[in-house]
Image (cartoon, rainbow, N blue to C red):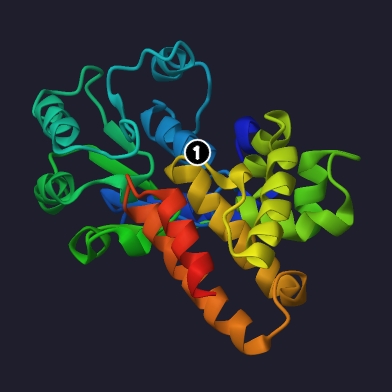
């Protein structure tokens, strides 16, 4: 089966779509799926299309049946969605989901749950979901979408069939973004920073590239003086993580733009990578204090 119209502009998803369809046709279809890959490559759109195909009465996303009509109206009672609130999926959300799944399917067929950013589940939420993955009710399918499946408990991962979504090629990314939106010589660095063309497109539309360049120059000034530049004040957790990722990418690409000593670069790059991981996983850190400590040590 070819890609549905909703995914036709993202041909790199074709392989994942076909693997899903082959598994479905084989009769060995898992009730739990972990859809993973880089951020910004269309995993959300793919998961939504997969969920829709399960709820289509023809199994194809025909667009004509009662199920497809309800999906088009965003009103299908057997399609359930969980996402972070605002950065964490809490146990209360999973308990509400479990309660909803105890009822009979409204349309008498499958019930499909899409959990976006599944790695944002806290420990209690993951533990609550585990029993549903171990002993799902008939006709229940759970699609867990994640940029970082390594952050999920092994007990969750082991009970899901993994669908690894390939990143687009450089040419596919350029084609998806459209002519002239990004200079080809800038594309590789920007894709490393944002993860994929969909995230990069969002950044372009939000005018974030000017902010990124201001952070780059601020890091250069900060490392030259040993004092954190004011441009890097007031960043929230997500911005701080991205600013650290930018510094790491630039260090790898051209360490001499920031530091003259190879030994200093190696230690700095390693610590920047570790700090990026902390800001990705530990909300509420004091970015100004952490950044300044980084400068003092280097």
Q: What crowding class fits label 1: few (fewer than 14 Cα within 10 Å), some (14-19), or many (20 or more)?
A: few
Residue 168 in view of the camera = no
Quarter the C terminus occupies: bottom right
Check disc 1 and report its element: helix, strand or loop: loop
Residue 221 in sight: yes
Percent of width and height locating residue 251: 67, 71
Q: Is residue 131 left or right of residue 97?
A: left
**Residue 159 sits in quarter:** bottom left
Instruction: Identify the image quadrant of residue 79.
Output: top left
The N terminus is located in which quarter?
A: top right
Q: Is residue 71 above or below residue 246?
A: above
Q: Position of residue 240 (x, y in %)?
A: 50, 49
Position of 210 compared to 23: left or right? Answer: right
- 165 or 248: which is nearer to us? 248
Name the residue: 57% across, 54% down: 228
What is the residue that sits farthest to the bottom in this orientation?
263
Q: Quick one: 290 or 41, which is closer to the camera?
A: 290
> Which residue is rendered at x = 49% and y = 52% of the image?
241
Residue 204 place in picture, x, y as percent: 73, 35
Q: Residue at x 64, y 65 (%)?
A: 223
- x and y percentages locating residue 227 in the rendered image: 58, 58
Q: Which residue is mark 1?
A: 234
Quarter residue 184 falls in: bottom right
């Amino acid at each position: 089966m070819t890609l549905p119209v909703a995914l036709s502009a993202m041909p790199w998803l074709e392989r994942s779509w076909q693997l899903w369809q082959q598994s479905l046709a084989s009769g060995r279809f898992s009730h739990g799926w972990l859809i993973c890959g880089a951020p910004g490559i269309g995993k959300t759109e793919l998961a939504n299309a997969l969920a829709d195909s399960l709820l289509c009465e023809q199994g194809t996303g025909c667009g004509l049946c009662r199920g497809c009509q309800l999906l088009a109206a965003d009103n299908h009672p057997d399609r359930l969605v969980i996402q972070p609130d605002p950065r964490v999926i809490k146990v209360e959300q999973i308990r509400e989901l479990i309660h909803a799944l105890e009822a009979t399917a409204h349309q008498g067929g499958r019930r499909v749950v899409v959990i976006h950013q599944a790695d944002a589940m806290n420990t209690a939420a993951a533990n609550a979901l585990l029993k549903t993955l171990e002993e799902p009710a008939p006709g229940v399918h759970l699609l867990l979408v994640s940029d970082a499946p390594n952050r999920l408990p092994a007990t969750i991962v082991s009970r899901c069939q993994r669908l690894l979504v390939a990143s687009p090629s450089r040419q596919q990314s350029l084609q998806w973004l459209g002519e002239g939106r990004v200079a080809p010589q800038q594309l590789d660095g920007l894709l490393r920073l944002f993860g994929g063309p969909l995230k990069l497109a969002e950044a372009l539309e939000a005018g974030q590239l000017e902010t990124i360049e201001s952070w780059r120059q601020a890091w250069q000034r900060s490392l030259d003086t040993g004092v954190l530049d004011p441009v890097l004040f007031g960043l929230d957790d997500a911005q701080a993580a991205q600013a650290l990722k930018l510094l790491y990418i630039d260090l790898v690409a051209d360490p001499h733009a920031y530091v003259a000593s190879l030994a200093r670069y190696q230690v700095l790059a390693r610590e920047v990578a570790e700090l990026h991981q902390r800001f990705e996983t530990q909300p509420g850190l004091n970015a100004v204090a952490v950044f300044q400590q980084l400068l003092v040590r280097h």
